[in-house]
Amino acid sequence: MIAADRDALAAPASNGSTEASFEAVFEESRRRVLGLCLHLTGNREDAEDAAQETFLAVHKSLSRFRGDCRISTWVYRIAIRAALRVKAKRAATESLDVEPSSSPADPALEKERASQLRRALSRLTFEHRTVLALFSLDGLSHREIAKTLGIPEGTVWSRLHLARKKLEAELKLLGYEL
């Protein structure tokens, strides 16, 4: 979670120092936003474009942040919309940037497994990749994902369940050993 919550932002923002608030939000969230954008867009270049678009929007709108949700929820919403826009501008991507484990027993096998995982993830819908990324990578709870996406918590549960089932089916089709 982003440590720079709405209470931490309130003091600098009320003193007219949105620059300090923005720097705090940026430093706390840049890696997670880039990771989320990477999983949603499918490649590093698009993810960097979406992350840049996200932080431009955050910078522009931070003084108008109402504080009716966590700052992380607000930033994630902006990032998801930015990733959708970037993805819509470009043709479908071929892969996700998934790194193999740091100490593979067999580097060739690990590289193949990572490639299979990228292909399987790229076949999931945007909605399924989004809930998987927010849950598995960012560690958000079902309730936090629901608030971030503006959907009922039950919908998060079902999307996550379906995403896992579809990912497992795709991996089996590709010969990925679970």
Image: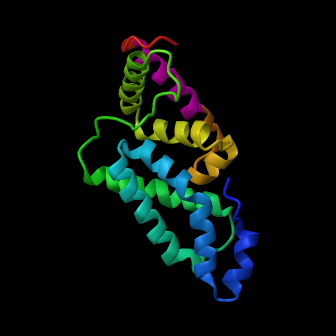
The answer to whether residue 23 shows anywhere in this view is yes
Q: Residue furthest bottom?
A: 15
Residue 2: give x, y in percent of width and height. Answer: 66, 57
Residue 93, position as x, y percentages in the image:
29, 40
Q: How is the image coloured?
A: rainbow
Residue 155 appearing in the image: no
Please name the residue shown 65% across and 41% down the image: 139
Q: Residue at x 35, y 44 (%)?
A: 43
Above-or-below relation of 124 to 64: above
Q: Position of residue 74 (x, y in %)?
A: 59, 62
Task: Say if the magenta span includes residue 65.
Answer: no
Q: Is residue 161 above or below residue 93?
A: above
Q: Is residue 9 above or below residue 124?
A: below
Farthest residue toward the left?
A: 91
Dominant secondary structure, magenta: helix
Residue at 63% x, 75% y: name it.
21
Residue 28: x and y in percent read 62, 60
Q: Horizontal placement of 73 versus 118: left or right?
A: right
User: In this view of the protein, which residue sits in the foreground, 11 or 111?
Assistant: 111
From the viewer's side, name the closer residue of 68 and 93: 93
Count of numbered circles on the image: 0
The magenta segment = 158-172
Residue ID at (69%, 67%): 68
Snapshot quadrant of residue 143:
top right
Q: Is residue 21 above or below residue 155?
A: below
Q: Nearer the viewer, residue 74 or 23?
A: 23
Whether residue 165 appears in magenta in the rendering, the answer is yes
Q: Is residue 28 left or right of residue 93?
A: right
